[in-house]
Image: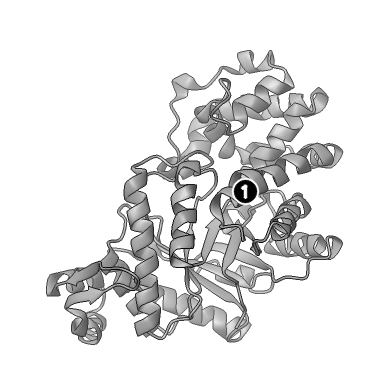
């Protein structure tokens, strides 16, 4: 089976020009004592907007690995795929994030539910958790509700997994199951029975992305009760350990945190929990690379700054169109967005400081940052003009991309040996 390793990181790259800078951060982390497997992820939606192909992501990842002489494992993730999109990623990907959130809450077939209840009724009562005095309380009602809510989704994950296995061959890819894009976090008992159902479907899942409480908005800090998140995260780690002990699941199964970019306030609880339980983690940082490109263009002044201003101006005028697909993962108050005419008067430092996620800088504006986070479609529409700018200002941008991943993310999240 393909080995993801204890720690891994999804490093999204909208336009496919920052793979070397991203990998450079991973290499420097290794020099500091932490081994992280890089996973270049890009979703079908992103490919559609950029007008790229999954093969482009594979090519850029392979090219960066070769140029920087990376000897460790690495993967290319077909991010958030379903049955209707999976075949597009078969040739280029070896990591599949199976997204079944849309199937959560759909009532399962009676025979499937009865089989699920029969297999799991032995857990009714108290369930001890490893390395803890805590217990999961399971009642018939809890078990039945878990089956009714999640079983259809897991059955769908099984179908998608078997489709990939048929086309790729067993053991030739990493499987992740994503259940995070739903309204409510899973309780520890629900999470346990989700894992039970995954094992029953014989999905060799290596990472699973549950829903946590709070808001995981794109590119900005976590919004919610940090202490509650800490408890949920630790409980999920313990539930995974218990499930691996009981069910036929991979021994290296680990939690995945989606929309993990810039969730600074929960990084210490994550790091502390990983140390405490000696567990692994997969975290996705996705779209912040595109924002670092914009910061680099702006800081370069000249035509780079003018392009950054142009992108913002066009995005401002198309607010509803750009924000609509992301409405569940952004919180933008338009009255705090600067007018394009105001932005036209900014220098590069002002634009970069307003966009860069530095809470200590008085210019930082989280609404401005979220607006640009979902506006990469505008850059895509600029075509060669934008790509030429990335090439022209490559060095400045690379510094920002590497620093963002290494300093703001890796050092804060992963325990350094």
> In the figure, is residue 249 to the left or right of 140?
right
Task: Name the image quarter holding residue 327.
Answer: top left
Residue 164 percent coordinates (x, y): 55, 78
Task: Identify the residue at image location x=64%, y=18%.
Answer: 343
Q: Which residue is mark 1?
A: 49
Task: Identify the residue at image location x=58%, y=24%.
Answer: 361
> In the figure, is residue 86 to the left or right of 179?
right
Is residue 240 positioned above or below 406 on the image?
below
- Quadrant of the drawing holding the C terminus: bottom right
Depth check, front residue: 269 or 294: 269
Residue 264 percent coordinates (x, y): 50, 42
Q: How many marks?
A: 1
Q: Secondary structure at mark 1?
A: helix
Residue 15 percent coordinates (x, y): 71, 48
Task: Name the image quarter holding residue 182.
Answer: bottom left
- Quadrant of the drawing holding the N terminus: bottom right
Residue 219 percent coordinates (x, y): 54, 41
Task: Identify the residue at image location x=73%, y=65%.
Answer: 58
Q: Is residue 287 visible?
A: no
Is residue 273 positioned above or below 123 on the image?
above
Depth check, front residue: 318 or 287: 287
Q: Is residue 183 visible?
A: yes
Q: How dense is the environment of label 1, judged by Cα within 10 Å: few (below 14), some, or many (20 and up)?
A: some
Depth check, front residue: 82 or 280: 280
């Amino acid at each position: 089976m393909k080995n993801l390793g204890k720690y891994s990181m999804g490093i999204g790259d909208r336009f496919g020009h920052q793979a070397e800078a991203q990998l450079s951060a991973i290499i420097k982390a290794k020099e500091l004592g932490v081994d992280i497997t890089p996973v270049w992820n890009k979703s079908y939606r992103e490919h559609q907007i950029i007008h790229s192909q999954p093969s482009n992501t594979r090519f850029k990842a392979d090219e960066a690995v070769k140029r920087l002489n990376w000897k460790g494992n690495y993967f290319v993730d077909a991010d958030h795929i379903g049955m209707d999109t999976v075949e597009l990623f078969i040739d280029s990907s070896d990591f599949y994030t199976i997204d079944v959130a849309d199937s959560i809450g759909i009532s399962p077939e009676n025979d499937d539910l009865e089989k699920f209840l029969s297999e799991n009724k032995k857990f009714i009562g108290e369930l001890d958790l490893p390395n803890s005095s805590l217990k999961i309380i399971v009642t018939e009602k809890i078990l039945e509700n878990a089956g009714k809510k999640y079983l259809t989704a897991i059955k769908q994950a099984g179908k998608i997994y078997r489709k990939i296995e048929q086309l790729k061959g067993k053991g030739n890819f990493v499987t992740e199951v994503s259940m995070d894009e739903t309204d409510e976090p899973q309780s520890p008992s629900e999470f346990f029975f989700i894992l039970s159902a995954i094992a029953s479907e014989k999905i060799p899942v290596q990472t699973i992305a549950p829903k946590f409480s709070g808001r995981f908005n794109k590119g900005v800090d976590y919004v919610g009760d940090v202490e509650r998140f800490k408890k949920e995260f630790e409980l999920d780690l313990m539930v995974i350990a218990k499930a691996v002990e009981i069910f036929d699941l991979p021994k290296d199964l680990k939690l995945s945190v989606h929309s993990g970019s810039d969730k600074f306030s929960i990084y210490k609880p994550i790091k502390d929990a990983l140390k405490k339980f000696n567990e692994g983690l997969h975290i996705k940082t996705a779209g912040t690379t595109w924002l670092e490109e914009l910061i680099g263009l702006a800081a370069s002044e000249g035509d780079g700054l003018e392009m950054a201003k142009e992108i913002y101006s066009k995005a401002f005028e198309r607010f509803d169109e750009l924000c609509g697909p992301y409405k569940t993962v952004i919180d933008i108050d338009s009255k705090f967005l600067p007018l394009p005419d105001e932005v036209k008067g900014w220098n590069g430092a002002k634009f970069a400081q307003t966009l860069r996620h530095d809470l200590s800088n008085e210019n930082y504006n989280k609404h401005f940052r979220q607006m640009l986070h979902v506006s990469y479609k505008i850059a895509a529409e600029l075509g060669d003009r934008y790509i030429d700018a990335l090439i022209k200002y490559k060095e400045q941008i690379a510094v920002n991309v590497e620093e963002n991943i290494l300093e703001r993310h890796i050092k804060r999240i992963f325990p350094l040996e």
